[in-house]
Amino acid sequence: MEISTGNLVREWLSGAGVNASTAARRAGVSASTLHRILTGQVDPSTGTLREIAIGCGVDLSLVTRPLSDWRAAAAARLMLEEGYITPDDSDGQIAAWASRLIRLARTDNAVEIVAAAAQASAPMYRAVALWYEGTASVGRIASAGDASGGSWALSGAAGLYLPESGESAPPVTILWCSDVRVASQMLAG
């Protein structure tokens, strides 16, 4: 779950037991700057955020990880698929990804946009993603999805052309499901 910068700073203030004006003074920023951060009106620099964190008795640590944002795929579909209805975008992140995809693809060519979206949405880097090698039938993978107890879908090559249930799944097959743990038990056995 992602948290807004304003909510993160609110957590720091609460944890430190200080009000915004005290934190602003300790951080060396104006009270109006801190107010704009808290209300999401500005996107502060990491330096400013670190000073606010220090003023609240915590430190800021940035960690990078491989890019894997489902909203990139949703943005590509929104851009290229007529009639596609996006999931909730009240935070504007899908719209932001549409602009990013144009920059990443460096053109409005559909194939390049899809390639950029695929790289940016890389499901294999998600915390709940599991990687399996070997062969499994499409039926076994579908059974694992069904056993997960909720919505499930196949994508990758298997999603493009649905092989028969007994056929081996194509080399790149992605199972999207509600309960990865249950599906994992079905596939590992």
Image: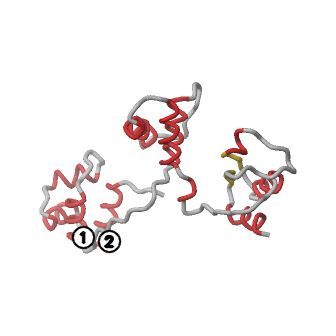
Q: Residue at x 83, y 52 (%)?
A: 139
Residue closer to the observer: 140 or 145: 140
Kindly identify the amino acid type of the residue bearing the numbered disc 2: Gly
Which disc, if any, is residue 56? 1
- Left/right of residue 171 with respect to residue 31 in the rendered view: right
- Left/right of residue 28 with respect to residue 17 in the rendered view: left
User: What secondary structure is found at the residue carrying circle 1?
Assistant: loop
Q: Nearer the viewer, mark 2 or mark 1?
A: 1
Identify the image quadrant of residue 187.
bottom right
Q: Residue at x 35, y 57 (%)?
A: 7
User: What secondary structure is found at the residue carrying circle 2?
Assistant: helix
Question: Residue 99, position in %: x, y?
Answer: 39, 36
Answer few, some or many: residues within 10 Å of disc 1's Cα (few below 14, many 20 plus, some between 14 and 19).
Answer: many
Identify the image quadrant of residue 10.
bottom left
Kindly identify the amino acid type of the residue bearing the numbered disc 1: Cys
Which disc, if any, is residue 15? 2
Question: Residue 48, position in %: x, y?
Answer: 20, 59
Identify the image quadrant of residue 96.
top left
Question: Residue 77, position in %: x, y?
Answer: 55, 34
Q: Residue at x 76, y 51 (%)?
A: 169
Q: Is residue 111 above or below residue 61?
A: above
**Is the Cβ of the residue at disc 2 closer than 8 Å to that at disc 1?**
yes
Q: Is residue 110 above or below residue 184?
A: above
Of mark 2 and mark 1, the one earlier in the sequence is 2
